[in-house]
Amino acid sequence: MSKISRRQGNEDLVNESIRFKEVLVIDQEGTQLGIMGRNEALDLAYNANLDLLCVAPGGNPPVCKIIDYGRFRFEQQKKAKESKKNQHVTEIKPLRVSPVIDQHDFETKLRQARKWLMEGMKVKVDMRFRGRMMTRLEVGKIVMNRFIEATSDLSGVEKLPNLEGNIMSAVLSPKKK
């Protein structure tokens, strides 16, 4: 039995931190023992060398279970770790092009973007307009649309090209296989 009386980082109500007068108690096998006072429920848990955990504090009456709290926390952490391991995080790779990009540079950037899209990564294409180029936005849109068109067999446009300040950006995501 562990003498856990303060709230843990995950806000579980355990043993003395339970402040309800009456609780519905469930034993370690899952059998309902009925509604009883908090002190009586704590005595039952301590006599079994276990802890009293409030599993449904919003219930009427609140539901408490007699369990080994250390083992319970371990199982919760194990489940959280397993679910985190199974998550797939899609990485967004940044790519910067210029509105007056040369053909060879354009093809190099395009080749890199296609490689990332084939690996399942998203690509964010940024185009910075400097100085007088702000008056020639249509040139930048042509280059951006040409880039999107060249990758259309591998990607879909997640975010259409739009201008935010002096940077035009678009996000390309890989097509599902």
Image: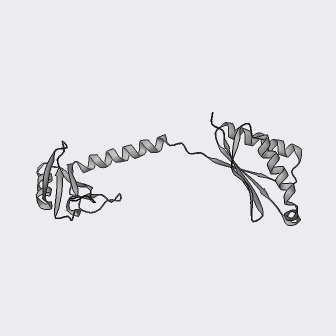
Residue at the image point whose x is 85% and y is 51% from the top: 142
Closer-to-camera residue (154/129): 154
Q: Residue furthest top?
A: 177
Vertical comparison of 74 with 153: above or below: below
Vertical comparison of 127 with 28: above or below: below
Asked whether the viewer can see residue 10, the reply is yes
Q: Position of residue 73 (x, y in %)?
A: 31, 49
Asked whether the viewer can see residue 1, the reply is no
Q: Residue furthest front?
A: 60
Q: Position of residue 149 (x, y in %)?
A: 79, 43
Along the horizontal axis of the image, is 5 left or right of 159?
left
Along the horizontal axis of the image, is 21 left or right of 8?
left
Q: Position of residue 82 (x, y in %)?
A: 42, 41
Closer-to-camera residue (141/128): 141
Along the horizontal axis of the image, is 117 left or right of 48?
right
Q: Position of residue 11 (x, y in %)?
A: 33, 60
Closer-to-camera residue (93/162): 162
The C terminus appears in which quarter of the rendering? top right
